[in-house]
Image (spheres, grey):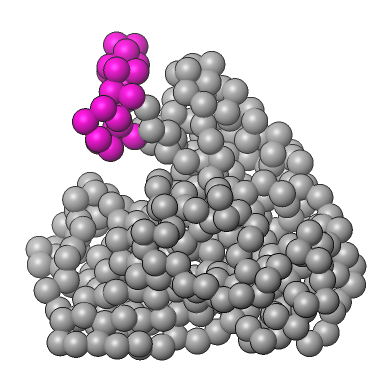
Amino acid sequence: MQILRNFSLKNYNTFGIDVKADRFISVEKIEELKAILRKTYSSEVFLIGGGSNILLTGDVDKLVIHINLQGIEVISEDENEVLVKAMAGENWHQFVLWTLDHGFGGLQNLSLIPGNVGTAPIQNIGAYGVELKDNFVRCSGLHIQTLQEKNFELDDCNFGYRNSVFKNELKGQYILTSVTFKLSKKDHQLSTEYGAIKTELQKENISDPTIKDISNAVIKIRESKLPDPRKLGNSGSFFKNPVISLENFRKLQEGFPDIPSYTVSENEVKIPAGWLIEQSGLKGYKKGNVGVHEKQALVLVNYGNASGEEILELSKLVQDSVKEKFGIQLEAEVNII
């Protein structure tokens, strides 16, 4: 293990923000991680995984620990189901492809989501009608101060929409080291109700889709709408889709009869944030090095050598515009540092 000083984090965040870490180290084993933490106060540590859900607005005056724990393991299986454990440093999309190559179903709708396995439970990542919690069994975490390892079962995690206990009561206390999923081996439950998936399958004349067919459809949809962060810096969806009361939604319908929605409960609906941003006239907006993506208004992009502050300023413009037009306060999905 080698601690690097004044280290650029440009290649460790998908926005491609060129900020510096005072000190940087990449760890590949849990024992290495423990050894580092024994020597460092928890307040002086900054953790980074795939860097897909953060906006760095300045240099990090701490020890940046890159969680690079690798490995995928089948824990147990029967003729119907399998438990698979993936280490935190595994790339999420590559892990999903691994499950599909082995005929394991459950994660196909979550294909091509950026980031690593270890950060997926923190956000309760989701797409096209499926969330991580739907196949989640447990995750293992290392307490930053005590170095005690602990398993968190499904009920421990308080999963909500892009939310979990790790963003609230336990924020900053644990480093997630692995995640275990229960996946199907046959009689897969397929979630194809989202219109975009239906349309893509129809284009391919697929009436009886396999789990790989659904994954391929999702990949095509995401590639058509979302920029590759390796070519254009971004963090995917910057904002959460707001959930509002049915009563508020009815009032909005009076002024905006075409406003789309998805039912959350008897009294709540979810509004696509991308639609709100587009209707506010900001889709394709560009100022200097930053902008709102021309194909997906939910994505803020770094067109060049943007600073984190420039992107943060753009996000506030988007929030203010949507608030003024619709009375809805958009909440960032991205962690702003």
Judging depth in this view, the residue of 122 and 260 nearest the camera is 122
- 265 falls in the magenta region: yes
For residue 50, above or below residue 172: below
Judging depth in this view, the residue of 179 and 328 nearest the camera is 179
Judging depth in this view, the residue of 181 and 154 nearest the camera is 154
| Residue 213 in sight | yes
Q: What percent of the width, then of the height, locates residue 330?
A: 51, 31
Q: Residue at x 75, y 75 (%)?
A: 37
Q: Residue at x 81, y 50 (%)?
A: 58
Q: Which residues are magenta?
A: 245-270
Judging depth in this view, the residue of 11 and 176 nearest the camera is 176
Q: Is residue 104 left or right of residue 157?
A: left
For residue 93, above or below residue 28: above
| Residue 221 in sight | no
Q: Residue at x 12, y 74 (%)?
A: 187
Q: Residue at x 37, y 27 (%)?
A: 244
Q: What percent of the width, then of the height, locates residue 5?
A: 89, 72
Q: What percent of the width, then of the height, locates residue 125?
A: 43, 57
- 113 falls in the magenta region: no
Q: Quadrant of residue 51?
A: bottom right
Q: Is residue 204 left or right of residue 279?
A: left
Image quadrant where one finds the N terminus: bottom right
For residue 154, above or below residue 89: above
Q: What percent of the width, then of the height, locates residue 253?
A: 29, 17
